[in-house]
Amino acid sequence: MLNKKQIGVKTEAFNKLKNFVSSRKYVSLRQINFFLEDHGYNYSRETIQKYIRQLKKEGVLHSAGRGYYSINKKQFPINYDEYSNIIELIKSKYPLPEFSLWSTKMLAPLFHHLQNKFLTFLFVDFDSMQTINDYLLQNDYSTFLNPSINEKNIAFKNNSIIVRPAVTRSKSENHISVIEKIIVDLFIESDRLNLIDFYEYRKILEALLSSFRVNISYLLDYSERRKIDGEIKGIIGGYTNATFFN
């Protein structure tokens, strides 16, 4: 049975932790453990998880992927209806191949500079790329089949569709890529097709992290599979702090 002194210490620790996490857009379980240890609190894993559950119950923290939390409650909004026509067109003709898409227009609220041209990226399995590309062309869509890194000066039209091979274990909802995938793909496509410079990209990612809650663990996992985890960690780590990652 705890005495009053012990209860006071635990209450003090919880309040200190609450103030600590409230001052950060994102926090990792590792940060929380380090913070408590640095302040002289040697608590069990179960006690720390109890604190986190209470912070979530109070609406201070929200889950942001495995081992990560955020004070941001809102998730980035995507207008699914705007892309329903092309999704239904593909599904009606080719119901079996898996596919997902995203558009730079979805990210318009995050851009530092106004954009006058938007591109859509369609990811399908490799064997279906040519077939689906040709089908979209027949239906009056402007498409480009997997343009290479050496083709930066292609005259894309507004809302042109770039057909790319699907990436394994990619997440999507209703055939729309999740925001974590979109933000990683944007980095790669910006380099391939000279869409935006690194400064603009950094501003977009920082705006996303500042106002919305993303799944940090999936963001890092997907960026690692796409071999740009160093660049993504550099931006996220600078935006939070060096002990952010698990």
Image (cartoon, grey):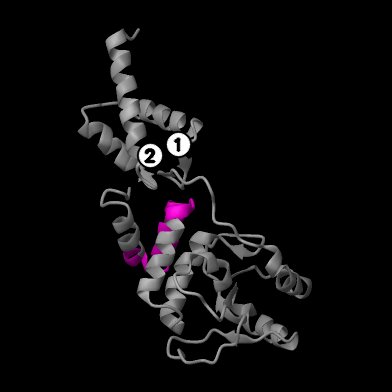
The answer to whether 77 appears left or right of 21 in the picture is right
Q: Is residue 214 visible?
A: no
Q: Quadrant of residue 44?
A: top left
Q: Secondary structure at mark 1?
A: loop
Identify the secondary structure beneath mark 2.
Answer: helix
Does residue 73 appear to the left or right of 150 in the view shown? right
Quadrant of the image occupied by residue 219: bottom left
User: In terms of image quadrants, where is residue 37?
Assistant: top left
Of residues 226 and 155, which is closer to you in this image? 155
Q: Amino acid at mark 1?
A: Val
The picture places residue 96, in percent across and down from the top left corner, at 71, 69
Residue 220 lies within the magenta run: yes
Judged by its main secondary structure, the magenta piece is helix
Residue drawn at x 46%, y 83% as measured from the top left? 193
Q: What amino acid type should be assigned to the residue bearing mark 2?
A: Ser
- State the separation of the CA atoms marked 1 and 2: 7 Å
Magenta stretch contains residue 241? no
Furthest-right residue in this view = 92
Q: Would you call the spot at circle 1 few (<14 residues within 10 Å), some (14-19), or many (20 or more)?
A: some
| Mark 1 / mark 2, whichever is N-terminal | 2
Q: Is residue 190 above or below residue 15?
A: below
Residue 29 circle label: none
Question: Mark 2 highlights which residue?
Answer: 22
The residue carrying pointer 2 sits among few (fewer than 14), some (14 to 19) or many (20 or more) residues within 10 Å by Cα, namely: some
Residue 244, image x and y in percent?
A: 31, 49
- In the rendered structure, the answer to whether residue 158 lies left or right of residue 180 reads right
Q: Which mark, by number, is residue 60?
A: 1
Q: Which residues are magenta?
A: 210-231
Residue 61 rendering spot, x and y as whole percentages: 45, 38
Q: In this rendered view, identify the residue nearer to me: 47 or 236.
A: 236
